[in-house]
Image (cartoon, rainbow, N blue to C red):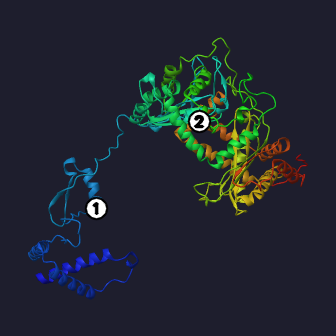
Amino acid sequence: YNTQNKMMNAVAAVAVSAARRRPLHQSHHAPISFTSLTSAAHQRQQHRERHDNGPAFQQVVRTRMDNSASSAAGAPAPPTFSSYDFPERNEAPVITRTRAIDVASSRRASDSSDNINTSSSTGASAIVPPHSKPISSAPPPAILSAPPSARLSTPATEITTLPNGVRVGSMETPSPVSAVGVLLDFGSRHERLRNALPDDSAVSTAGVNHLLELLAFQSSLPSASLSSTHLRSRLDNLGAATFANSSREQMMYCVDVLRPNAVPAFDLLAEVVKCPEVAEEEVEEMKKVMEFQLMDVVPQILLGEGLQMAAYGKLAESNGDGDGDGDDDTLQQLGRPHFCTAEALPLLSARSVHFFKEQNLLHNPHGVVVSGSGIEHDALVELAMRHFGDMTAANPNEPPPSPPPHDNPHTLPSTYTGGQYRLPTPLHSLYPDKPQYTHVALAFEAPLGWHSPHLVPLCVLQTLLGGGSSFSAGGPGKGMYSKLYREVLNRYSWVESAEAFSSFHAESGLWGISGSCRPDKAGELTKAMVREFVELSRYYVTEEELQRAKNMLKCNVLTQLESRLVLFEDIGRQILTYGRREDAESMCGKIDAVTKEDIIEVVRMAIGTMRPTMGVVGVDISKVPMIEDVEKMLLAESMGTHSVGGSGGGSRGWSCL
C-alpha cells in the first residue's frame, strides 16, 4: 500500500512538472495517456533514487511515508511537495482557498474573527493578515458629503465686483473638490521688443508670457517666507494640482484642491500671482528650458505662429505705442509671436518680468477676474477681497476703462491684412528617415472676433467641416461623417491630416482649414482646400449635415462643462471678455437657431470680400502655390457657376467676386 501511494504521489508530481515545462504551443495537444504517464513517473522515480539520496530526499520520503500512514488511519492527507516542484523555496507554500461567500460572511463578522481563515482540508486554523482595513461607507471627516438630491438646486453663476474693480465669478457645485484661480487681462500681444525706461535704458518684454507660464509656482515667495522648494512642498501637502496657461490676450493661474484646503491653496496662489520673487537664477533656469523647447518645435506650432503673423502683418503707419522707441512699432499686436523666439530669448531677464507685471497687472484691477467652481461664492469673494482688494489703478482719478473688448489700456486694435507665410524647415538631424510632410493652412478673417454676430455660425461651420488625422479610431461622435473626412481624407489616400480650425480675439479672428501630406502632393492638397471653400459658398449644406453638426457642437459644449476645471475657466474667460457669463442653455439655443442660410452667408462674406491668409511649413514647400495663385484659383472655381442649390434651399443668382 505504501509503495503504491508513493507511486501515485510521484505520478502527480510529474504531471504538474510536465504541465509547467510544456511549451505554450503544446498546451492544446492531446492529453497524455495514464499508461505513458505512469511509465514516465516510474523512470523518473528510479533516476532520483539513484542520483538523489541526500538528506533532503530522505526527508521527503519520510514525510510522504508519514502522510501515507495518516491516510491509512483514515485522516485526510495534506498535499505534499518536493524540492523538485519548488526549487527556490526551503519549504512548501501554504495554499488557502477562499470562496466569495466566505469573504462576504467575514466582512459581516466581528473584527476579532476577520483575520481567521479555517482550512477545510486539515481542520487547523491559520491567521491570514488582511491587506487593508475595510473601507467605510462614510466619507472622511475632512471631506464634505454631497447634499441630498432634494436639497439640490440648479447651479447658477454668481458675479460680484469689488470696490476697486476686481470681478469675482463662481458656480457652486456639490463636489468635494474646488477649482479656484485668477484670470488676467494681458497676454503676448502686450509684449514689446524694446521698452524705454525713465533712466534712458531699455528692457525687452518679448517672450515674457512664455516665461511666466514656466515660472508659475516655481519661484520663491518672500512675503510668505517660502522658497520655491517649500512652496511646491506646501502645495503637495495640500493635495493641490496647479496649472498656468498664457495666450495672446489672457493669462490664467489655477489650483485644483480638496474643498477644505481651498483657502490655504488660494492664499498661496494669490502670492504667486502678485509678488513672486523672480530671481535672476530662476529666470536663467527657465530660459534653458525655453532653449530646449525651441530646438524641436512641432510644425503645427510654427504654422499657427506664421498664420498669425501673415494675417496681421506690418502696417506702413506706426501701430506701436507711438513713442518711436521700439524696433517693432509697425508690428501689430496680434501679429507678434506668442512663443519666445530665439532672437528674443537672450534679452529676457528678471527685470523684464517685473516691468511687464508692473505695467499690465499691479495697477490694473479691472483686468483681474477671480473665478471658482465647487466653492461658495461668499467665501470666494472674501478671499478675493483679502488678496486683491487693495489693488489700485495707476491713476485713481481716471474714469473706469471702457467696457470689453479693450479693458487693458495697453491693448491696441489690430487690422487684418491677409498674406502668406512660407517657412522651409531643415531635415530632422536625429530622425532623417522619418516621413516628412508639408503642412498647409488656408484661412479667412472672422471680423469682430469674440464679439462677432457670426460667432456661433462659425463654430457650427467648424464642426460641420470637422476632419482630423488619417489615423483615427473612428466610431460614433468621432467626426467620421464630417465633410473633410468624407471629401478629403477618405478620397485622397496621400492626405495625412485635414482639419477645420478657428482662433478668436477681441477685435478679429481667423477660421479656415489646415492639412498635411507628402511634399509632392502639397499642390493638390491646396486645390482640395480651395474646392471645399468654394463648394460651401455655392451650395447649401443639407439639413442632415447641419443637424449633425449642431448636435455634435452641443454635445461637445455640454460634455466639456461637466469638467470642474473647464467650468472654472469658462466662467473666468467669459467675464473677462464680455463682463458676464452666458449659460449652457442660452448657448444651446443659439446653436439650434443656426440655419443653412447663416452658414452660406459666412462663407460668401469671407471669400467675396477678404484676401485669404496662407501658411506653409515643411522640408519641401516648392509644390505649394503662392498666395496670388490661390486667389486666382478661388476666383476661377467660384466663377464656375453662379447658382446656389441644395436640398430645400432652392436657387438664387450670385456672383462670388
Q: Please, what secondary structure does the residue beneath circle 1 have? A: loop
User: In the rendered image of this protein, does residue 80 appear above or below residue 231?
Assistant: below
Q: Which of 291 and 541 is in front in this view?
A: 291
Name the residue at the top extreme. Answer: 397
Give residue 99's mark.
1
Dividing the picture into quadrants, the one containing residue 315 is top right
Task: Identify the disc placed on residue 210.
Answer: 2
Residue 236 image label? none
State the quadrant of the N terminus: bottom left
For marks 2 and 1, the one nearer the N-term is 1
Q: Say which residue appears at 85% left-offset and 41% top-offset.
A: 609
Q: Can residue 180 be seen in this view?
A: no
Instruction: Pinpoint residue 34: horizontal percent, then vertical percent.
Output: 27, 86
Residue 557 x, y percent position in the rendering = 62, 43
Which residue is rendered at x = 85% and y = 44% of the image?
608
Callouts 2 and 1 close, C-beta under 8 Å: no
What separation in Å lies between label 2 and label 1 (alpha carbons)? Answer: 59 Å
Q: Which residue is drawn at 66% across and 57% down?
A: 436
Q: Where is residue 454 in the image (x, y as percent from the top left)?
A: 75, 39
The disc labelled 1 sits on which kind of residue?
Arg
Q: How crowded is mark 2: few (under 14 residues within 10 Å), some or many (20 or more)?
A: many
Splitting the image into 4 quarters, where does residue 471 fall?
bottom right
Question: Does residue 452 appear in the picture of this structure?
Answer: yes
Specify whether 453 is left or right of 365: right
Residue 403 x %, y %: 69, 23
Looking at the rendered structure, the kind of residue marked 2 is His
Q: Give above or below for 8 relative to 225.
A: below
Crowding near the residue tagged with mark 1, few <14, some 14–19, many ≥20 C-alpha atoms within 10 Å = few
Which type of secondary structure does the marked residue at label 2 adopt?
A: helix
